[in-house]
Amino acid sequence: MENTQTFPRYRRASASPRIRHAAYSLVRGQAADPPWVRPALIGLLGTTALLYLWNLAASGWANAYYSAAVLAGTKSWAALFFGSLDASNFITVDKAPAALWVMEISARLFGFNGWSVLAPQALEGIATVAIVYLAVRRYLGPAAGLLAGAVVALTPVAGLMFRFNNPDALLVLLITAATYATLRAIENGRTRWLVLAGALVGFGFLAKELQAFIIIPVLAGVYLIAGPPSIGRRIGQVLAAAVAVILSSGWWVAAVELMPSASRPYIGGSQNNDLISLIFGYNGFGRLTGNESGSVGGFGALGSRWGLTGWNRLFNSQFGGQISWLIPAAIILLGASLLLTFRRPRTDIVRAAFLIWGGSLLLTGAVFSFGQGIIHPYYTVALAPAIGALVGMGAVFLWQHRSERIARLALGAALAATALWAFVLLDRSATFFPALRTAVLVGGLALAALTVGLANASRKTALAVAALGVMAVLAGPAAYTFDTVSTAHTGAIPSAGPAVAAASGAGGPFAGGGPTGGFGPPGGAFGGGFGGDLRGVGPNSASGGGGNPGDGGVGNPGGGGFLNSGRPAAALVSLLQADASRYTWVAATIDANNAAGYELATGDPVMAIGGFNGTDPAPTLAQFQKNVRDGKIHYFIAGGGGLGSGSTSSNASQISAWVQQNFTATTVRGVTVYDLTTTAT
């Protein structure tokens, strides 16, 4: 039967006991639950833990850029606070550091290694699944919560990013928790829940800056529509939540901005050493407009420098297999459910739940679809909770109303659309489990037809069709997810699932989906393709990649290059470590990924000239020359330089030229090294 529980407008209990009660209910279940609920929940969370934690260390350092920053944070509290790439605090990473803080705390507690760096993301993924379960089961029952959680856990890009050390895992956890808190505020009208939602969004800003704010219009808008108090009080509560957002996100920004630039590291990713310009430019509105100073852009005019934009972007060869499996079903179920709840009271919590999850999916999806700046397919993990919640809620809600023809038609349409789209996605990886796409197509269409005729079916028949329908819609993404978690991933831009064949013109200048999983033609100028993980970069690629994912680096004797980091040869590591304690930086090299490889290999600070892309104007030639005169830098390592020498900053080019003119080059296992303590004769 439909969940018809009503909720009082106000309750005396504070938010903290409610959170404790939610956690208790998650583990122990509720007295009214059927006997199958607790074992099913334990199975869901246990399976999620197995997926996300199993063989986690196989990816080594994963994204070495962030792992190097974690290493720095274990050695320097200042590096931890600022999010510096090196312990000597030359330059920060190009994001706010909250995700690093979690990893750095883990590494300080358990030692710095691949597992301690990656485990926090896995735990954040498990927590995300649990919160989605709690948010959905509270209003639609345990079956809806379990289905929602399973959809999140088995989304391929979730299986990737909850086993990887990019900031997205913490961001997704926090915005999911903020959505849950907003629903609780809509349920009872308490300001505390709405303020908690604002604080969670604000802390999400400290993980990935303005991306966390995308859902604010949805959270605030739905509360203003459906919140129990009077409109005046609702407006006041939303303003209080806005203050919470500002305080929880702004304290770190204020601390950095108020500190003299000479007393802190350079703000990586900015062109003027200013955090505000980074937030609103490179990491902010520039992602929408494409005007991102310091980006590596300028790769043609295919709608944007990062590929075609438009409503179908999330379905193309780059993005489709990552996230889009159940988007058609989610939209169909959302539309039908809103139609059936249209005449309910303004404060109806079920309709509000559909509005809040549906709005999050549509608004975030629109930003990803039409943004003309930097975007990578793994960003779409932010959509997974909303898709899971809509599928779980919509399927169960319409199932409860299957006596109505519109509900049966919507369920059948969702099943059919999912089966057809899964066939298309699986066909893009034609050699990957070829029998699966036919089974999903035939089974899904047959079950869709049966679902439409369920009105007079027996209970056992209906339950059998429902169970088989769930299996059909999850089979495709589950197969991709299992492939993802059983494969090591390294590099700056990983991708989930097997290699795909690119649709013509769909992926932008670096599309192609080489057979190793990158986005681009195998063996091209960028190895396995720009945007792929190190499965697509070979030791002969131009960027110096290659891969031994077990140690987080590559087989190449150098330090790596743009978008990937290498594992230097032992002889080079020994050279850099000699007398390391005498120097602030044991070496300097161009671009941060190149520097990260050397930093992880030696355990010592390495100056990343030009930051992540090699385009940051730091240091200046004069600053670098002063550091050399003061004996702070031992070696300069040639190589790196971002996406080709033309993309480096003029500062980096000047420094490189000055070093070549004034110091003698030596070669160590194929890598050119300059000793900056000995001038050329």
Image (cartoon, grey):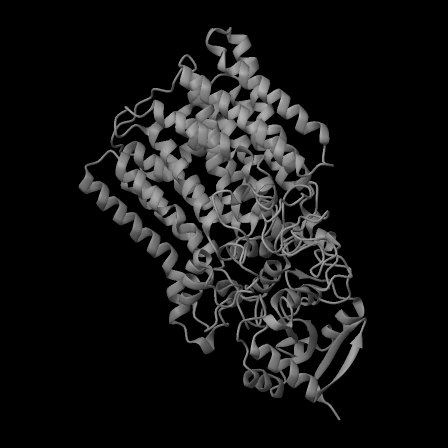
Please give the name of the residue rendered at 56% of the width and 62% of the height, measured from the top-left corner.
73
Q: Is residue 575 left or right of residue 401?
A: right
Residue 131 in the image, given as x and y percentages of width and height: 46, 36
Please give the name of the residue rendered at 54% of the width and 32% of the height, measured from the top-left corner.
151
The quadrant where residue 619 appears: bottom right
Residue 252 in the image, given as x and y percentages of width and height: 41, 62
Quadrant in which the C terminus is drawn? bottom right
Please give the name of the residue rendered at 71% of the width and 78% of the height, measured from the top-left corner.
579
Please give the name of the residue rendered at 67% of the width and 24% of the height, measured from the top-left corner.
439
Residue 401 visible in the current orientation: no
Residue 659 in the image, given as x and y percentages of width and height: 67, 84
Vertical arrangement, residue 26 with respect to residue 293, above or below: above
Residue 210 visible in the current orientation: yes
Foreground of the two, 568 or 516: 516
Residue 399 in the image, given as x and y percentages of width and height: 45, 18
Foreground of the two, 647 or 109: 647
Quadrant in which the N terminus is drawn? top left
Q: Is residue 589 left or right of residue 329?
A: right
